[in-house]
Image (spheres, rainbow, N blue to C red):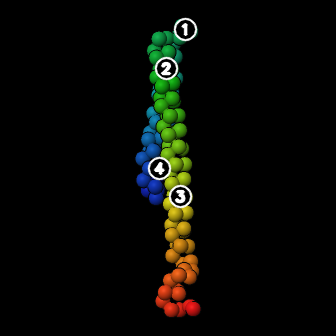
């Protein structure tokens, strides 16, 4: 069984991807066995299966593209958030001359 990943987005997308790959594979195997004509000509059923397979592959490519874009946007957002937190940390620990003068720590 697949382990749950830390990102909530990746796990459902991975399951959907695997489901679509399995569906395309199963349809391809079943189509090869059942649609072989005996007289040597292509049947109408073969052409319908081919077009539905093309649609499934197209949808699969779109899902993969969307997943990749979402992943990179998430990483960009994480980097920006990390930089903001680092800036706040630096600001917290930088020396403030005015505060030291007010408290009488420095002349």
Q: Earlier in the sequence, mark 3 or mark 4?
A: 4
Point out the frontmost of discs 2 and 1: 2
Point out the frontmost of discs 3 and 4: 3
Q: Is residue 59 above or below residue 107?
A: above
Point out the frontmost of discs 3 and 2: 3
**Element at label 4:** helix
Q: Is residue 41 above or below residue 82?
A: above
**Element at label 2:** helix
Q: Residue at x 57, y 91 (%)?
A: 107
Name the residue tied to disc 4: 10
Per the model, the C-alpha gap separating discs 4 and 1 is: 44 Å
Taking depth in this image into account, of 62 and 19 the one nearest to the observer is: 62
Q: Earlier in the sequence, mark 4 or mark 1?
A: 4
- Spot occupied by residue 55 in the image (x, y as percentages of width and height): 48, 25
Name the residue tied to disc 3: 80
**Element at label 1:** loop
Taking depth in this image into account, of 99 and 70 the one nearest to the observer is: 99
Q: Residue at x 50, y 34 (%)?
A: 62
Per the model, the C-alpha gap separating discs 3 and 1 is: 60 Å
Question: Mark on residue 24?
Answer: none
- Spot occupied by residue 59 in the image (x, y as percentages of width and height): 48, 31
Q: Earlier in the sequence, mark 2 or mark 1?
A: 1
Question: Mark on residue 41?
Answer: 1
Q: Earlier in the sequence, mark 3 or mark 2?
A: 2
Name the residue tied to disc 2: 51
Per the model, the C-alpha gap separating discs 2 and 1 is: 18 Å
Q: Residue at x 49, y 46 (%)?
A: 70
Per the model, the C-alpha gap separating discs 3 and 2 is: 44 Å
One can see residue 3 in this view: no
Give yes or no for contact between labels 3 and 2 (Cβ–Cβ under 8 Å).
no
Give yes or no for contact between labels 4 and 1 (Cβ–Cβ under 8 Å).
no
């Amino acid at each position: 069984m697949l382990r749950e990943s830390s990102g909530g987005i990746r796990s459902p997308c991975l399951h959907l991807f695997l489901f679509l790959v399995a569906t395309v594979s199963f349809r391809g195997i079943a189509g090869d066995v059942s649609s072989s004509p005996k007289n040597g000509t292509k049947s109408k059923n073969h052409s319908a299966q081919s077009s539905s397979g093309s649609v499934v592959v197209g949808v699969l490519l779109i899902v993969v593209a969307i997943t990749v874009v979402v992943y990179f946007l998430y990483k960009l957002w994480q980097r920006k958030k990390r930089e903001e937190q680092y800036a706040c940390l630096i600001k917290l620990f930088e020396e403030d001359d005015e505060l030291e003068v007010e408290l009488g720590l420095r002349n």
